[in-house]
């Protein structure tokens, strides 16, 4: 992986291929390896995936907020001289995507919320984050992740694909406790970003799982009416991990979204010259 400095921390990222820049941002308890089997489909694009601070091979950065994570994305894009891209954020990666769109929408052809939403944490959710922080401080990352991973998938998929869950648990168990704790604090303290969707001047993609235990279905559905241009996909019998649970369908959805954004923005002309 390549690295770049952000606030004196090493940030790891990977870049593959040529074409329209497509950036994938992982969620909480994950790293850029979660996209290993998903991204080969996009071989005719420039695919960039980033390890957020404290995850994968990126350094832990204390006191980091979701807005800082958006700053990490901008730093990588600037270093690669990428003027505009499509950003796809999974869950916490979607929170980062919205924070990025809030400040740098002119750098986006469009963006996708992959099992994510713009709403701030409720008091109950904040309390859950605090309990998570305490648990990780006492018992470390591996046990926390081991308990979390099965809750992310719809039960039938989890039963039939234990190897995928084991892999996610293995990757997650490697995250330093402080990386998880910092991200829990960042999510707990993030603002409501509904206005980002309301004011969005670019298309927004929503991928929703009806059995997503991490993003309540009413949140998922409520947000879809906010942007002016929305591409909405709702999957039955799917949890929080559509990139595994509905791999082919969600790959095709993202490919179609890229093409749609291109028609609006004519980026193919910009890329080819
Ligand atoms: C994630 O997958 O990133 C988390 O479920 C997001 C959250 O806890 O809000």
Image (cartoon, rainbow, N blue to C red):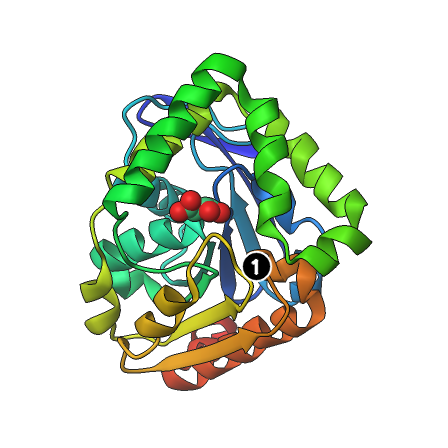
Q: Residue 98 falls in which quadrant of the image?
A: bottom left
Would residue 264 appear left or right of 19 to someone viewing this image? Answer: left
Residue 66 visible, this angle: no
- Up the image or down, 270 lies above or below 88; here it is below
Measured as percent of width and height from the top left, residue 116 is found at 42, 58
Measured as percent of width and height from the top left, residue 235 is found at 58, 73
Where does label 1 land, which residue?
46
Q: Residue 110 falls in which quadrant of the image?
A: bottom left
Report whether the residue tagged 1 is closer than 8 Å to ligand 1: no
Measured as percent of width and height from the top left, residue 264 is found at 38, 84
- Up the image or down, 195 lies above or below 122; here it is below
Secondary-structure class at tag 1? strand
- Up the image or down, 271 lies above or below 264; here it is above
Residue depicted at x 60% and y 24%: 143
Residue depicted at x 74% and y 38%: 166
Residue depicted at x 37% and y 36%: 128
Residue furthest to the bottom in view is: 263
């Amino acid at each position: 992986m390549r690295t770049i400095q952000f606030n004196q921390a090493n940030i790891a990222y990977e870049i593959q291929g040529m074409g329209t820049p497509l950036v994938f941002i992982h969620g909480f308890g994950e790293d850029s390896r979660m996209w290993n089997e998903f991204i080969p489909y996009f071989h005719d694009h420039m695919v960039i995936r980033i390890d957020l601070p404290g995850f994968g091979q990126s350094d832990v950065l204390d006191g980091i907020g979701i807005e800082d994570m958006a700053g990490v994305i901008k730093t990588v894009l600037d270093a690669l001289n990428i003027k505009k891209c499509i950003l796809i954020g999974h869950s916490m990666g979607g929170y980062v995507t919205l924070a990025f769109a809030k400040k740098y929408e002119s750098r986006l052809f469009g963006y996708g919320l992959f099992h994510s939403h713009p709403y701030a944490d409720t008091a109950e959710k904040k309390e859950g984050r605090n309990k998570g922080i305490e648990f990780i401080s006492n018992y470390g990352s591996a046990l926390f992740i081991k308990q979390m991973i099965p809750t992310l998938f719809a039960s039938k998929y989890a039963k039939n694909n234990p190897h995928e869950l084991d892999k996610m648990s293995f990757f997650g168990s490697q995250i330093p406790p402080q990386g998880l704790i910092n991200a829990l604090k960042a999510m707990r303290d993030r603002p409501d970003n509904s206005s980002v969707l309301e004011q969005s001047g670019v298309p927004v993609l929503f991928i929703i799982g009806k059995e997503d235990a991490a993003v309540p279905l009413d949140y998922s559905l409520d947000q879809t009416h906010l942007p002016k241009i929305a591409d909405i996909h709702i999957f039955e019998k799917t949890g929080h991990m559509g990139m595994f649970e509905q791999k082919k369908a969600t790959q095709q959805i993202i490919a179609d979204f890229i093409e749609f954004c291109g028609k609006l923005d004519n980026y193919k002309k910009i890329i080819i010259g």
